[in-house]
Image (cartoon, helix red, strand yellow):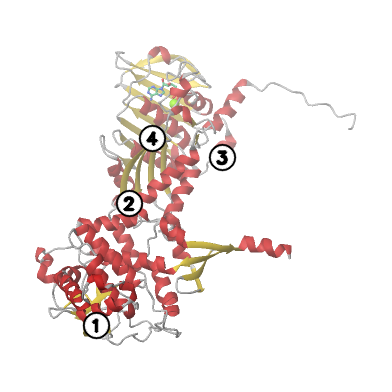
Amino acid sequence: MPEDMEPGVIRKLDEVVVNRIAAGEIIQRPANALKELLENSLDAQSTHIQVNVKNGGLKLLQIQDNGTGIRREDLEIVCERFTTSKLARFEDLAQIATFGFRGEALASISHVAHLNIQTKTAKEKCGYKATYADGKLQGQPKPCAGNQGTIISIEDLFYNMPQRRQALRSPAEEFQRLSEVLAKYAVHNPRVGFTLRKQGETQPALRTPVASSRAENIRIIYGAAIAKELLEFSHRDEMFKFEAECLLTQVNYSAKKSQMLLFINQRLVESPALKTAVDAVYATYLPRGHHPFVYMSLTLPPQNLDVNVHPTKHEVHFLYQDEIVERLKQQVEARLLGSNSTRTFYKQLRLPGAPDLDETQPGDKTQRVYPKELVRTDASEQKLDKFLAPLVKSDSGMSSGSSEDAPPLPDESFRVTAAKKSREVRLSSVLDMRKRVERQCSVQLRSTLKNLVYVGCVDERRALFQHETHLYLCNTRAFSEELFYQRLVYEFQNCQEISIKPPLSLKELLILALDSEAAGWTPEDGDKTNLAVSAAEILQNKAPIMREYFGLRISEEGELESLPSLVPQHRPCVAHLPVYLLRLATEVDWEQEARCFETFCRETARFYGQLDWRDGSVGAGHPRWTTEHVLFPAFKKYLLPSPRLKDQIYELTNLPTLYKVFERC
Ligand code: ADP
Ligand code: MG
């Protein structure tokens, strides 16, 4: 070390400079100051809060409220550090329910700007006006006229910190931030009326009425497009002791800009962990790079909340954070899927390029009617005879005849016809089935399905697919059954039909069924012909239900005329038809509505999930082809997988593991 080097002299920094630097940490721009002032006004029970701004708040930021006001004797010390009316003892720190508790906001502001307070309490006859600098009252408060409440004026922010001042070059940007802060508080506090004005302009930049609602304020501030898609719910969690109130957009809405309004114990905060979790739920449904609008208000036991992480108090941490975030994620997931218009979501799943909606009516391709756009204007449309109107016959014979690689019909006698228009389902039993499907849908698995890449068929029951770097083996049969079940539930009353020409005799089919091993007939069961006749009778009795709701037709002569068409290009395997019909007669609970639909759908799904593997050929229409070109695309497009299906998927390997293996070689 050179000898002529003198050690630096350590000096105590000037107190004013220290305070100024500390203040600059808390108040970094006008929007931080506004947040503190809004919280103070709300703490003071105000019902009207008006903000005036000049030059993005850099020249002037003024906030006027009609709250309790500040007592004359407190004006002396109100701007000194650590003075607060909200906290008397250290132990109170944990109990504090009001926003501020550190008594630092006004003090900080007074160190970096010219600060004026005009205030009047209910008790005092007149108001007082006081000026502050560096935390100290300048002169004496002057009596003045005025209404109850407080006006706080901040002028020339950072006049004494030129570099800080220079960094904030754009008043427009600062104004934008101010209005964002105000907007968020306005949504969170709908009982209070907020106004934001640029000085000199007659129209306020933003205004919400007193005694409004959160949804209404969202509409006023963020627009109708968001407001009409809002889903509102609250959740109370006993386990982790928190309450959440949420307003978030359904999956029909998305925007490039991410909007998350998060309040924890009434203060505006940010929680990157929660944001990431919520975004992940939506990512499955929204286009890439698009986001929802989310408002959440959480209430936690104050002792579980740590707000002292950052001087600006924006970022918070709380006890059980991971668990609470996970709970909220589940809630959002469940509500999104359980919400009413998720039927639109389900329908939307199939809209992109879905041929089955509009190609059934050749020559009328121009107007695709989205289910969500169907408005019933004429009550007579709901009359039963309307539903039984003659079917429109498709001349191609296939609903998806336009597809280039459409297979030849496996059986020339199977033709698809379609009902004209979506009919609205009102039966609560069916709506409940849908709700159950949606509620149980695993978002994670749904996302896997959506993005999978088909690899190949292993055997009758199993196929391989890849997702990201993972290779999976899945039980195709279990997936198909669930798929067809859901198709029945969602196409209820709107099933297209596969017509059978010539029609097949029920009785003959049933005898065939009884002859098969699967039926397990024994002589004790009685004469086969008699059994077939009575099974045919049951089916014929119930024919109107099957025709009306599922597009399965049985003629008066006891002949099977059509079956539901559930997935384009898919035909159930004829070999299993007899046993299916027999099971319809014996396994479906025809007595009780909800049970009846449930068992009918399950039986039908079971039948449709069977492929004819005895057919050893390859090419279009055959099992391997169907698995790849019909079933997997349908899984991707339609299936809302319940977590139960997770047991039907097995991860064989993944790339990172393979790398490890190869590294050793
Ligand atoms: P804190 O809010 O943490 O107490 P502040 O520096 O923000 O600290 O405010 C100091 C005190 O000034 C508050 O405790 C409150 O008593 C009083 N005060 C500030 N703003 C208002 C207001 N708008 N109406 C009534 N009292 C106010
Ligand atoms: Mg405060």
Quadrant of the picture in which ligand 1 is shown: top left
- The amino acid type of the residue labelled 4 equals Glu
- The amino acid type of the residue labelled 1 equals Ile
Q: Which of marks 1 and 2 is in front?
A: 1
Q: How would you rate the neighbour count of disc 3 (Cα within 10 Å): few for under 14, some for 14-19, many for 20 or more? A: few
Q: How would you rate the neighbour count of disc 2 (Cα within 10 Å): few for under 14, some for 14-19, many for 20 or more? A: many
- Disc assigned to residue 500: 1
The secondary structure type at the circle numbered 2 is helix
The tag earlier along the polypeptide, 4 or 3, is 3
Horizontal placement of 556 versus 22: left or right? Answer: left
Measured Cα–Cα span from mark 4 to mark 3: 50 Å
Please name the residue that numbered disc 2 is placed on.
226
Q: Which of marks 1 and 3 is in front?
A: 1
- How many numbered marks are there? 4
- The amino acid type of the residue labelled 3 equals Gln
Which of the image's four quarters has the N terminus?
top right
The tag earlier along the polypeptide, 2 or 3, is 3
Q: Which of 164 and 481 is in front in this view?
A: 481
Please name the residue that numbered disc 3 is placed on.
166
Measured Cα–Cα span from mark 1 to mark 4: 57 Å
CB within 8 Å, label 1 to label 4: no
Q: With respect to residue 538, does 66 lie above or below?
A: above
Q: Position of residue 278 (x, y in %)?
A: 44, 48
- The amino acid type of the residue labelled 2 equals Ile
Q: Nearer the viewer, residue 273 or 608?
A: 608
